[in-house]
Amino acid sequence: MTTQELPFIRVVREGPVAVITIDRQDKLNALNRQVLNNLASTFDALAHDDAPVRAAVLTGAGEKAFVAGADIGEMSTLTVEQAREFASLGHRILASIEALPFPVIAAVNGFALGGGCELALACDFIFAADNAKFSQPEVNLGVIPGFGGTQRLARRVGLGRARELIYTGDMITADEAVRIGLANRVVPKAELLNVARETAAKIATKAPLAVSAGKRAMLRGYDQDLSSANALEIVEFAGLFGSTDQTEGMMAFVEKRKAQFTGA
Ligand code: COA
């Protein structure tokens, strides 16, 4: 199966790496329902592609924005019940991206505001272009983050910093995002995609089941008490033994050669 391109979403496959671009440039890639649903369908198709994806990069089209937020026009007329449905949709989709069997790197190439920052937080980690700007500006609109920002931002940068960002709506630079642990590194804008692709390609050379198990253990363990989380690690670690790639990885070390992983 080849992943079909849906409106507002572009996909480029480079072997085991997929680069997904949200392309709604006239609205700075803002997330309306259609963009969210198409993004979810795209990731779902990639997760089931016959040519397996081992790592992905998510970015925004154009020069200015990763994603400038949830679509304010669409949100402006929501009733309480519709707002609950909209937030639930965003939560469902971001949780499904977060739980994909392969890592996703957010390549933040400009504004990552509101839902855009939340989407980047649902990715495994963030690389920021030197022009990137991050913010949870919802208090300026009379609301709060609704796609997980109050929870994932605090888990990423700590409660004190998340509180300051969410109460003030302040916009921070890429350097500041790295300083507080929101982004992993700042990259010159022209090099951002290449650096993200190279990192994804490097991940794609590692044992796929091991990368997935590491991702699962960190994601599921993070909110558990330490001993339960460590028990989860034991299960994931042991589950890899007997896999073809575990045998291959350890044999290759003993035989002083490069391992050839197959994902089995
Ligand atoms: N939802 C819907 N449309 C949005 C949007 C959003 N979150 N962010 C930007 N847009 C639209 C603008 O309305 C404008 O559309 P128009 O040309 O039809 O009027 C277009 O994208 C370009 O944005 P513009 O504001 O003209 O660009 P700018 O360079 O002057 O400002 C921003 C850029 C990001 C500072 C500004 O667009 C902004 O503040 N956006 C909203 C950010 C926000 O509050 N996001 C959180 C939402 S939860």
Image (cartoon, rainbow, N blue to C red):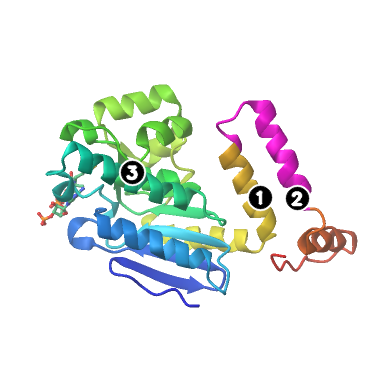
Q: CA distance from mark 2 to mark 1?
A: 9 Å
Which is closer to the viewer, label 3 or label 1?
A: 3
Furthest-top residue in this view? 160
Q: Residues within 10 Å of mark 3 (few under 14, many from 20)?
A: some
- Whole-percent x, y for residue 228 in the image: 67, 30
Q: State the residue in front, 68 or 210.
A: 210
Residue tagged 2 = 239
Residue sitting at 37 percent across and 47 percent down? 119
Which is closer to the viewer, label 3 or label 2?
A: 3
Q: CA distance from mark 3 to mark 2?
A: 33 Å
Q: Left or right: 259 with respect to 179?
A: right
Q: CA distance from mark 3 to mark 1?
A: 27 Å
Residue sitting at 36 percent across and 63 percent down? 21
Vertical order, 5 against 186 (above or below): below
- Whole-percent x, y for residue 13 in the image: 48, 72
Q: Left or right: 240 with respect to 136?
A: right
Residue sitting at 58 percent across and 63 percent down? 54
Give the mark nearest the N terminus, 3 or 2: 3
On-image quarter of the C terminus: bottom right
Residue tagged 3 = 88
